[in-house]
Image (cartoon, helix red, strand yellow):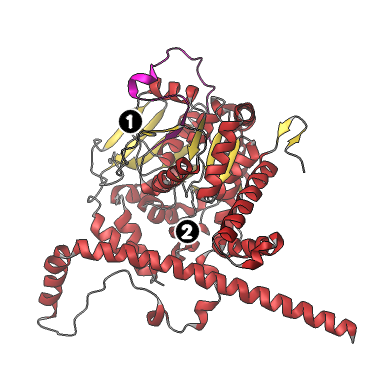
Amino acid sequence: MKLACVVQRFGAEVTGGSERHCRVIAEHLASHHDVTVLTSCAQDYVTWRNVYPPGAVRAGPVNVLRFPVAHQRNLGRLADISRIVFTTRSSPEEQERWFVENGPEVPGLIEHLQQHGAEYDRILFWTYRYYQTYFGLPLVADRAILVPTAEEDPLIWVDVVDRLFSLPIGYLFLTPEEAQLVSSRASRPLAPSSVIGCGVDPAPPHVKDVDLSMAGVTDPFILYLGRIEPNKGCQTLLEYFDKYLDSGGPPVQLVMAGFPNMTIPSHPSIKCLGVVDDEMRETLLAKARLLVVPSPFESLSMVLLEAWNQGLPALVNGRCAVLHGQVVRANGGLSYRYASEFAASLTYLLAHPDVARRLGRQGLAYVEQEYRWPHVTQKVEEFLSASLKV
Amino acid sequence: MTVLADDIIRVEPLMREIEDRVRDDLRRRLLARGGAPEYQDPEVFRSVDRLLHRAADRPDEHALLPEFLGPESDWRIETHVRFASHRPVTGPLVLFVKRRILLPLTRWLYDYTVDNFQRQERVNRMLIACIEELAIENARLRRDLEQVRSVRL
C-alpha cells in the first residue's frame, strides 16, 4: 500500500506523545508499505518556528515531506480565542479560528493533499486538535483514517469537532476509553475502528547503574517522569504529596525527572532532576518504589507502559478514565481521586512492598500480552487491509 | 469479590477497600470537628458521599439547570474581553488603543482576575451539579413514595 502519515511535527528530536506514536507506527508500517510522512518544518510545539528545511528527506525507513509553517504561534491570540471557544457558546467561525491560531498553519501541506491525496491508498492523520488534520482531513475524507489521540479536555466538546468526527472512513484508537470518549462525542455512529495502543520493546537488560545518591536521590523514592507542568497534574501532585507527608505515612522522597515548566518548592523530600539521560532514566525506573502519573488528560500513558515494562507498579490519577482503565485492566497499580486517597494508597503500597512488587509484575505481564510490536502491528495491518475492502 | 483471585491481585476491590477506609476516616474526622450528627450513621454518610461523587463526575455540558437560567449572557461568567465600538470614525482608533496599549499594560491584573473567575466558575458548576443531583434524588423518592402509597390503597 502507498500510505501517508500526516502529523504536526516529525523527527527523532521531537518529543510529544502523538508525534512519537506517529513515528514508531510509520516506521513499523514501512517494513511492508511505501510510507511518506507529511509534516511541518517545526520542531517545537509552542512557537511552531520553522527549524527543519522544507522538502523531501529520507528518515530511516520512511520518506518525509516537510512544509513550512506560515507564521509562528501567537500565544496571546490563542489564549484569547481559547477563552471564547472554551468558556462560552462560540460560533463555528470562532471555533475554526481556534484551529488556525492553534496551528501549525501549513498551507503547502493542505495544497499537497488537494493535488496528490488521491495518489495514496490510505492517509493516516495524527491528532484531531491541529491545523493539518482539521483542514486537511476533509479534503481526502474518502481515504482518511484518524488517530485522534483524544483526551477529556474541553476541545472535545467544541461543536465543529463533531463534523470532523463524521468524516474519516476509519479510526485507530489508543485505548478503549478513548474510543468510548470519541464515540460518545460524535452525534452519528463512528466509522469502523480498532484499538491499537502502541508497541513497546522489551526492556534492555540492565547494563550500567548510575549512582543516584550523587544526584541527591535517597531510597525509598517514588518517581514522576515527564514534563513537569500544571497541565500534567504536577501542581496537584505536589499538593497531594505535601498532605501525604503531613499524614505521617512512611517517609519517602518524590523524585521528578523531566523538563520543569513550573516552580517546584524547595523541600528535603522533593527532588527535581530536570531532564535526565537514558541511563539515569533506566536506573530511576529500576530503583523507584513506584511510578506516579498525576495527569488529568491522557489518551494512552506511554510512561506507564514503560514503568510496567520494568516491572514497576503505578499510582495514577483516577479522575482520568484512561489511566484508571489502564491500571484496572493490567492490575498493575492503584488509582486515587482525592488527596486523602492518594495518601492512603501511597501508604498502602509502601507498607506492602510484596503486594507492590506483584502489581508491577502483573503490569509487565499485561504489557507482554497487549503491547509488544508484533501484536500491535498485526492489529494495524488487519485494520488497513479491511479498510481497503470496504 | 476478593482482592486475591486466581493468584492475581485484583486492584479494583483493593482500591474499594482503601477508598472505604478513607471515607470512614473522613466521617470520623468530620464528626470529631462537629460535623452533621446524621453522619453518626455510616449509611447516611455513604449516601451523601455517593451523591456528591456523582455531582463531581457529571460533565458540565450535561446539566439541566442552566437551561432555566435564561440567556447565557445574563449569567455565565465572561472570562474573555471582547472589544467593540459604535463610533464609525474614531472607533478603530479607540479599539487600537484598548487592544494594543491598555490591555498589554493591564494584562497582569486581567490574568489574575481571570484565574479567580475560573476558580469561582468551577465551584458554581459543581454547585449546579449538586442541586441537580438532589433534585433527581428527590424526584426518585417522590416517585417511590407514590408507588408505595398506591400499593397501600
The quadrant where residue A197 appears? top right
Q: Residue at x 52, y 21 (%)?
A: A203
Quadrant in which residue B92 is drawn: bottom left
Q: Amino acid at mark 1?
A: Val
Q: Are marks 2 and 1 on the same chain?
A: yes
Residue found at x 23% / y 50%? A70
Q: Secondary structure at mark 1?
A: loop
The residue under the point 30% across, 65% down is: B114
> Can you name the residue that lies furthest to the bottom here?
B153
Q: Would residue A173 be seen by someone viewing this image from the given angle?
A: no
The percent coordinates of residue A29 (x first, y second) are: 50, 31
Please indicate whether residue A17 sits to the left or right of residue A47 in the image.
Answer: right
> Dot 1: few (<14), some (14–19), or many (≥20) neighbours within 10 Å?
some
Chain name for mark 2: A
Q: Is residue A283 above or below residue A254?
A: above
Start-end of magenta stretch: A197-226
- Report the residue marked by disc 2: A156
B86 over B59 or under it: above or below: below
- Location of residue B83 in the rendering, given as x and y in whole percent from the top left corner: 22, 75
Q: Is residue A187 above or below residue B94?
A: above
